[in-house]
Image: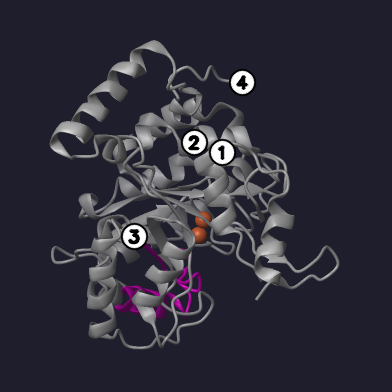
Amino acid sequence: MGIKFNNPYFFDPKIGKNNFFLFISFFFHDTIGIDLGMILVEKLLLGSHVSFNKQEQLLGATLEALSYGANTFMFYTGAPQNTKRSSIDLELTSLAHKLMEEQGIDQKKVVVHAPYIINLANNNDKYDFSIRFLKEEIERVERLGIELLVLHPGSHVGLGSEIGIDNIVRALNTVVDSKTNVKICLETMAGKGSECGKTFEEIASILNHMKYPEKIGVCLDTCHVHDAGYSMDDFDSILTEFDEIIGLSKLWVLHINDSKNSKGSHKDRHENVGYGHIGFENLMFAIYHPKLKEVPKILETPYVGIDDIEKAKAYPPYKFEIEMIKNKKMNHNLIEDIRKYYKKD
Ligand code: FE
Ligand code: FE
Ligand code: ZN
């Protein structure tokens, strides 16, 4: 268990030194009309996965995020498992940008997730297709005015990690050029099957060979690192290791998920916040970590079924998980609250 001394999650506004901040904050609010408190305290960048459909596109995605009380979000530009993509509607896009600005959503912190059929690690007959599709995806993301694109490094499927990583390096250096405006965030993986990127060393060995290193960073997924064998009981040590091997300035996105399995299981099955093997306190520690204030935190936790018997996932948990995280208090009735809320309509 790491010592959780520098985490504002354990920050009590009633304690001494913070009173000074509250005083300054009230001063600004009352005399100048600037809500410094809103700017400095409330700036938790938190959102979830949302859907992106053909009819409403980025506008629909923004509205869905707002309905969850989020100030950032992530989406796939189409079904994650296929390559059918509709063309980007510029009017819907500009309406979405306007709405984001009005509602205080920073466009630069919104995230697109590349489809997982892209596999850059195996140079089989689908390798060129993956490269081409990623190139097109980057263009779509640019057209949407979005900067962050999360990508799974890929699975080597029997070639071995070293060759897999060589393939990834070659592919990324083909796709990214001096004109690329999108920042690709390689996701840390659970190590399911032959996934590359299950250790910080593997991610670093990709990043160290980039022709345009400023355009490639990392997305850390809490469920994945836990499943890969890192201890979420000691997140400070994870960050220290990340900093030593990759560099903390490369951490651009955080995926917040609990895990259905124990540490090192290599399973990659997400669980709702506080309901898995990582636990509420450990996730809160990561979410409110002072070194990660600028990093958007995205929930990818599973939808909740209509009851315990029905297997089909029906209701999004995000509104309630976001509320719980903002309240800094575990909701032991989360699942029931979600069902009650959505059953009404
Ligand atoms: Fe992912
Ligand atoms: Fe993820
Ligand atoms: Zn996952």
Tag 4: amino acid: Met
| Position of 97 relative to 150 (above/below) | below
Residue at 35%, 75% (x, y): give it. 58
Inter-mark Cα distance, 4 to 1: 14 Å
Decide which of tag 4 and tag 1 comes sooner along the chain.
Answer: 4
Decide which of tag 2 and tag 3 comes sooner along the chain.
Answer: 3
Q: Which residue is mark 1?
A: 283
Q: Residue 104 appears in which quarter of the rendering?
A: bottom left
* Secondary structure type for disc 4: loop
Q: Residue 144 appears in which quarter of the rendering?
A: bottom left
- Residue furthest out toward the top: 16
Q: Which numbered dot is residue 286?
A: 2
Residue at 67%, 60% (x, y): give it. 338
Residue at 20%, 54% (x, y): give it. 212
Q: Which residue is mark 4?
A: 1
Magenta stretch: give its range: 111-137
Tag 1: amino acid: Leu
